[in-house]
Image: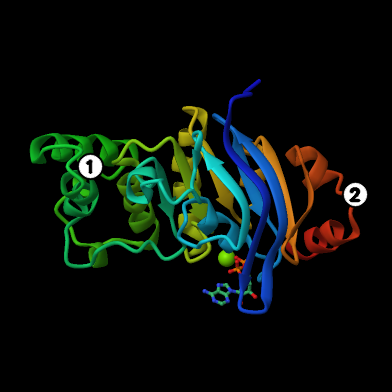
Amino acid sequence: MQDKTIISVKNLKKNYGKNEVLKDINVDIHEGEVVCVIGPSGSGKSTFLRCLNKLEVSTSGSIVVNETDINDPKTDIDRFRENIGMVFQHFNLFPHKTVEENIMLAPVTLKKMNKNEAKEKAHTLLQRVGLEDKADQYPNQLSGGQKQRVAIARALAMNPDIMLFDEPTSALDPEMVGEVLKVMKELAQEGMTMVVVTHEMGFAREVSDRVIFMDGGYIVEEGTPDEVINHPKQPRTINFLNQVL
Ligand code: ADP
Ligand code: MG
């Protein structure tokens, strides 16, 4: 059983003006754990994920990651973010850079590696996501599934401890979903700590250790995939699952 807490969220609240988007989120995530976050559109899933690496600043509450309090003004956020990889729905690759350059950019500019090391790392990662022959291509020469696999490789280039995924397959044509989920599953099996916002219930069932159902800015229900997806207790969870399954 994994028990070292790597992310600890207490009484997290996030408002946008008068809109209370996260109301009182409490959750601990353990090293090596794969947590899937599910819930209806607008329930606060992306905001929650973005608070974890301070892409959004929380209104109140505490978030401790790897023993670092991210809301402590003394915390070097750029440094802290190097340990967290993030993958978005829309890939966000740099269009005027090749696949290899996209992957090398952060390690080189943040001076974590010299160019040769970064290039070698990029090739190792491309091999891992099955795209070693695409190193010199530009993003617009790739399919959506390939772009997302490059985005995952790019996020891994900094050797993060944690990977955050925000609906990584939602923008993909159905035939490309599997190739991206396969890479994510392998990553999970290698022991990566992952928080994955997804509508892919098959992935959540098969790969995650824990499923969190969010609605209206609250965690309404959480548990093993079997508990939450197969035997939900809360009416809102049941209602949501009836719509997506
Ligand atoms: P989900 O990812 O579950 O669909 P979000 O976290 O994106 O939900 O959004 C939750 C709520 O917060 C929505 O009502 C949305 O309109 C609002 N919201 C999200 N981002 C912003 C923002 N940058 N400014 C203002 N409101 C936002
Ligand atoms: Mg979202």
Give the image location of residue 19, x and y in percent.
67, 77
Q: Position of residue 86 (x, y in %)?
A: 42, 51
Q: Quadrant of the N terminus?
A: top right
Query: Is any part of residue 96 visible from this angle?
Result: yes
- The image position of residue 202, as x and y in percent, is 65, 47
Outermost residue on the bottom side: it is 18
Q: Which residue is mark 2?
A: 233
**Disc 1: which residue:** 132
Q: In the image, what residue type sits under mark 1?
A: Glu
What residue is rendered at 48% in x and 48% in y? Answer: 72
**SS at circle 1:** helix
Secondary structure of the residue carrying tag 2 is loop
126 vs 49, left or right, is left
Q: Residues within 10 Å of mark 1 (few under 14, many from 20)?
A: some
Front disc: 2 or 1 = 2
242 vs 183: above or below = below
Of the residues under marks 2 and 1, which one precedes in the sequence? 1
Instruction: Left or right? Give the position of 110 relative to 44.
Output: left
